[in-house]
Image: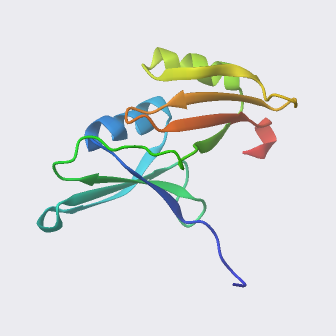
Amino acid sequence: MDKARVLHTMLRVGDMDRSVDFYTHVLGMRILRTFDQPSDNYALTYLGYAEESETCVLELTYNYGVSTYELGNAYGHIAIGVEDCHQACLDISVMGGKVIREAGPLEGGDEVIAFIVDPDGYQIELVERPANWF
């Protein structure tokens, strides 16, 4: 494969509105496109910080009538780069998000990380990056 890149990561969600609210209002993503297929009992929402042509995005999938999923033990987390992990945790908490590991250095290193959890229980790692990285 000469030219390839990751397009999106898909998460199944139990309530599309609740999840879209979290990812847009708490994490600051924007809705890029939606697709509703009532005849096949599912709806999709693509969210991100930039256009799909520029970066990997998040696909939320809602299957009509399914409100919860078992996350399993193979799933790890989504990672999002932020300029200031401490401030991001504060902002996320103020917006009603749940911080499950406060900002601090990665064990055995000096990279600053934090962990939050979305409304469906998916873990999201915040990784501190310098301003010029964005």
Residue at 17%, 67% in the rendered image: 40
87 up-or-down from 131: above or below: above
Q: Residue at x 60, y 59 (%)?
A: 55
In the drawing, does residue 63 fall left or right of residue 33?
left
Q: Is residue 58 above or below residue 70?
A: below
Is 88 in front, or is 13? 13
Query: Closest to the observer: 84 or 41?
Result: 41
- In the rendered view, how is the structure colored? rainbow
Is residue 41 shown above or below 105? below
Q: Residue at x 52, y 56 (%)?
A: 57
User: Furthest residue to the front?
Assistant: 73
Q: Residue furthest right?
A: 109
49 above or below 128?
below
Q: Residue at x 53, y 36 (%)?
A: 123
- The location of residue 32, given as percent across then percent down, is 41, 55
Quadrant where the C terminus is found in the figure: top right
Left or right: where does residue 15 sit relative to residue 39? right
> How many numbered marks appear?
0
Q: Is residue 14 visible?
A: yes
Looking at the figure, which quarter contains the N terminus? bottom right
Tell whether 10 sits left or right of 89: left
In the rendered image, residue 33, in percent from the top left (x then y), is placed at 36, 58
- Residue 131 is situated, as x and y percent measured from the top left of the image, at 77, 36
Task: Report the side of 77 relative to 12 (left or right).
Answer: right
Q: Quadrant of residue 108?
A: top right
Residue 88 location (% of width, % of height): 61, 24
